Image: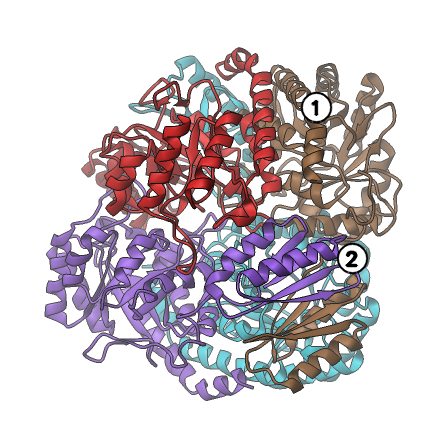
Chain colours: A red, B purple, C brown, D cyan
Amino acid sequence: MIAVLKRGATKADEKKVIELIEEAGFSAHPDTGAETTIVGVVGVAPEKKVNLKEKLQVMSCVDKVVVISDPYKLTSWNFKQDKTVIDLGDGVKVGGNELTVMAGPCSVENEEQMLETARVVKEAGAKILRGGAFKPRTSPYSFQGLGEEGLKLLAKAREETGLKVITELMDIEHIDVVCKYTDIIQIGARNMQNYALLKEIGKLDKPVMLKRGMAATIKEWLLAAEYVMNEGNHQVILCERGVRTFGEETRNTMDLSSIPLVQQLSHLPVIADPSHGTGRWELVIPVARAAAAVGADGIMVEVHPHPENALSDGPQSLKPDNFRLLMDELSAITNSLKSFRSREKKIAYE
Amino acid sequence: MIAVLKRGATKADEKKVIELIEEAGFSAHPDTGAETTIVGVVGVAPEKKVNLKEKLQVMSCVDKVVVISDPYKLTSWNFKQDKTVIDLGDGVKVGGNELTVMAGPCSVENEEQMLETARVVKEAGAKILRGGAFKPRTSPYSFQGLGEEGLKLLAKAREETGLKVITELMDIEHIDVVCKYTDIIQIGARNMQNYALLKEIGKLDKPVMLKRGMAATIKEWLLAAEYVMNEGNHQVILCERGVRTFGEETRNTMDLSSIPLVQQLSHLPVIADPSHGTGRWELVIPVARAAAAVGADGIMVEVHPHPENALSDGPQSLKPDNFRLLMDELSAITNSLKSFRSREKKIAYE
Amino acid sequence: MIAVLKRGATKADEKKVIELIEEAGFSAHPDTGAETTIVGVVGVAPEKKVNLKEKLQVMSCVDKVVVISDPYKLTSWNFKQDKTVIDLGDGVKVGGNELTVMAGPCSVENEEQMLETARVVKEAGAKILRGGAFKPRTSPYSFQGLGEEGLKLLAKAREETGLKVITELMDIEHIDVVCKYTDIIQIGARNMQNYALLKEIGKLDKPVMLKRGMAATIKEWLLAAEYVMNEGNHQVILCERGVRTFGEETRNTMDLSSIPLVQQLSHLPVIADPSHGTGRWELVIPVARAAAAVGADGIMVEVHPHPENALSDGPQSLKPDNFRLLMDELSAITNSLKSFRSREKKIAYE
Amino acid sequence: MIAVLKRGATKADEKKVIELIEEAGFSAHPDTGAETTIVGVVGVAPEKKVNLKEKLQVMSCVDKVVVISDPYKLTSWNFKQDKTVIDLGDGVKVGGNELTVMAGPCSVENEEQMLETARVVKEAGAKILRGGAFKPRTSPYSFQGLGEEGLKLLAKAREETGLKVITELMDIEHIDVVCKYTDIIQIGARNMQNYALLKEIGKLDKPVMLKRGMAATIKEWLLAAEYVMNEGNHQVILCERGVRTFGEETRNTMDLSSIPLVQQLSHLPVIADPSHGTGRWELVIPVARAAAAVGADGIMVEVHPHPENALSDGPQSLKPDNFRLLMDELSAITNSLKSFRSREKKIAYE
């Protein structure tokens, strides 16, 4: 962290700045240039820096404070040198060498829909079944999900197909019931900064998939993961699902560059959700292919045997035929890229 | 709602579209133009339209679906013709003819700070005291608030000064303790779409101030208010606190036009928070003046007797002298505009 | 286009709306629902609709006007059923079945740099050499390019390697000199809505690559292409180079979904520029792979033999080794996807 | 500027960084902390820093480069300690103590419209008449303006009313004809980074109003002004006209906080254009009031005697009655705030 003093700041000003820094337990390194004086802040207590930064900003002799070190602890490669692999049992992993596909309907609607979809996605090669039982809807007048009834249908589909299950948890009250049925807890974009909820799931021994908030920076997203990890639960998967921009033609703007960027900053696996990222099934296939090519650890995609009858998100759901095409294309891409891994690593560490 | 068929859609396609609309309980009004056919959807069950819209979008013969009517019910002027006035007792109101000012520190820190601030803001003319006891911080390593201890200090300041109190509620678990001490529950930007929380506070008999989410459209904001009102609690205040844009120089971009826009759509009062909207105290005064001039029903502003010691948000807090200046300027502006009200109304209804 | 009348609009209001529509040369199709009346506008003169829309919006009885048909003419699949292929001679095409790669330095700096880069990119498989001679820089104090001297060096590199050349044109004054040396004129993001320039290049017989503006919607981008095509020049390539969002970690946010979206709306080829889209060389390789997988018709990428000495954009330039790796990966991806084309088409027309 | 070295950077790395800085003519101030080494760059040649920054970023041992000093020269208070006042003669000034109002139609349409509007705005107190003769329209099929014919009508209206005139210049070719008739050249948002045009008008002795680009940061906006000033023309007015965000309900999002922010950074006057900033006449009045209260040096507003017949921007044009109301409100606000100036200054320099 560096405090930049205003032009015309006096030696007395500089002294006050240094005192403040030292009182906070850091050491101060002043440096006077031709036009401005800067004071570097050195120390190893990042958790105290937020407050010190604000205190410095308040001083009338300080022009601005520039933060240099990243605020990450547990999510960072500095904390853990091996990539995090979430092992769900039966050979299903997220973050390993395979592209893990999670597929299924937006909402669990009924037994027939759930079982039919589960069979389709299993057969096409998906490892994890998605389906919402508690639905965060923009309008209170929209379908809100089947609740525990839906969770039971997910469990039934798991039993029949052997797929693992992921479903959304929206509030602390439902932690027990959701955990009873699911293999991965999904935290949706709207709850990415619901800190009370993050702290509670941080106490569980259950993998969590944390979606990026609609307008969350990479920093806020990783710090949300820190909320979970700081309570002890280190089994976190991140999910890019598009951010909000001025774009009018798609539901969101898929920020695929966030995937390699996060992978450079963090050991956590990152997957892509092109269904919410685009909102239009015709775009889901090409964007899912792009996510595989960009290096995502997995893909989550909405599939519905009869989108025209879906209770939610029909327009962004793939029909079975399209999903099978996508799975074949994803295999082709990941296979074509396998042989480049060693060359890529070499360059990265050059 | 209007379904626009693709070029080349056949009569059989049109028939299928009409059937779907009628099955959903609406009536269909087809209209064939030179190049495209459109089918109007008429009916009075807005809550069913979300799903019908998606079903129509899925049909291969449908190019797009255009929604015409607004999704609002309880927040709309169609529901209630009188402006909502939140009456907090002792003559303190939000939404009446006065500009109501809420002021105080970001966080409750200790008794001295709280009482000193309360006296300052009371004397300068504020009616409501703000102060956070439960703090939503981006990093888990930042100060998280004093909890109930903080609430008690707020209550003590209320007792001494007669100010009403507003404080943030972050989760369902703390509803009882927060309600015990506060006059208005504040729901922060990060929780604007925490629907479980919104539903619970919808069951209370306590005024609620709902901040706009960082990337929330006007529609999403009003629908979040509908979540609260739909459960029975109609005492909702809206608060514009800036939205996230590409701007790098301010914490957020204050969207002041949202205030008259919401006032045209809804009977709910709308206030402005220039402290979070700008993040810089030098900008708080001019932007607060602008909020008064744009017609806000109130202003929420952070004041701290010693910003350099604040545990949070020091850089955006006004010192007492600046706050007094602001209060005088706000009075001057609102007084100068009073005589225009009848001319404004005349034009609006012309 | 549909005019939605306000609640309470009278028959007389409706009549006035109909008259306005008919005066403008369109036919009016009124439809009265339970709560609102809508009036459809039918006719075949899209160029008159912008003005009619505004006139209707002004009427006090009109709530809003909803545009249904797209404003595109020459860029649309309705105008031309075959994909546009830009043929640059010697077998170099953009928009055909191959992924065409354009590569080279941000700025032309000197002969050695230009020839060295040209040899590298030629050998690795690029078909087109990029290099800026006139540079649009945010600050007037930054390097502004070598001008005609730079164009001569580009031409020299073309002569030696057989590569085609693309370079940016910034103003009408330099049209002749740029055209003398280049095979494709590049119009930068900042000039996407420089309509005087677009009209002039519309009169040329020279391919044009039109970059998407920093905050341009798909509609604005295609309409900018219409400006060029409307003057007679139909050899237009579009280039996605990232849009501006709240993201702080990358130079722009690459909107890869725009590529398949534009391909669904228009017959024009669309390429991706991951160098400007990300601003960081470590992200260029994965995002370029993603662009290939999403179906881009080409890739433009910055390559510099010694990025540490580059006069501009060093941080986003690939070194030769990295560029060769990228080219091999791009080949692998495009080859792996070739066999799926017929299945994709079948689904699209299902 | 500060280069932050990567963890694990060696002494040899540090030496290379220092050499690079010194070669560029700056002095290097290394500082080694517990975890990272930073190297400060000190010197007085800001125009060389852009390139040095990129060179440092390219080095493999450098984690990031943080820019500390602002890149402004001529626009900055460091360059000129008095506020710039643009004197148009006959007592009409922009940047003085008055709020200067520019008003008139979007497009010049015909003599009757122009003269009628000029009389209305003159009588209500505006000092400057606006009207577009060359129109930048998103679609090539929309009305493109009357050209010189329109300029003549503006001049005629000036002759009759004594109002000064402002009109948009879109390209270098029309500089002479526009300058012949106008008192202020307007550069539109789409041309804010049309550097060739900026350089040309920099050579003129004619005031320029530079609108903020749709997605321009404050820095880019001021640097665009530097392009003009660097050529010698220091008569620059800045105009905030809204930026592009995810907002769907208004044409743009008016960023009113940019006005005091720019006034803190620069001596140039800044005005507000609430017509383009909102796109809806019902919002123009409140947002214009807010602009006055925020401290804008002027307001530009669209007025049309018959918006329902306007050839462009009818929906955002004020009718004469509304404009008169607005002028009265603006007077009331500015009068009410006059007495606070000395208190404001005192606080600012505290």
Question: Where does the image place residue A141, in percent across and percent down from the top left?
Answer: 41, 61
Residue C255 in view here:
no
Which of the numbered marks, if any, corresponds to residue C338? 1
Q: Are marks 2 and 1 on the same chain?
A: no
* Residue D80 percent coordinates (x, y): 52, 55
Nearest the camera: D20 or D168? D168
Chain letter behind tag 2: D
Residue type for callout 2: Pro
Secondary structure type for disc 1: helix
Q: Position of residue D15 (x, y in %)?
A: 44, 16
- The crowd level at tag 2 (other Cα within 10 Å; few <14, some 14-19, many 20+) is many
Quarter of the view holding residue D318: bottom right
Q: Is residue B75 above or below residue A55?
A: below
Q: Position of residue B343 (x, y in %)?
A: 49, 87
**Nearer the observer, D192 or A176:** A176
Q: Read off the residue under disc 2.
A: D140
How far is disc 2 from disc 1 in space, using C-alphas?
38 Å
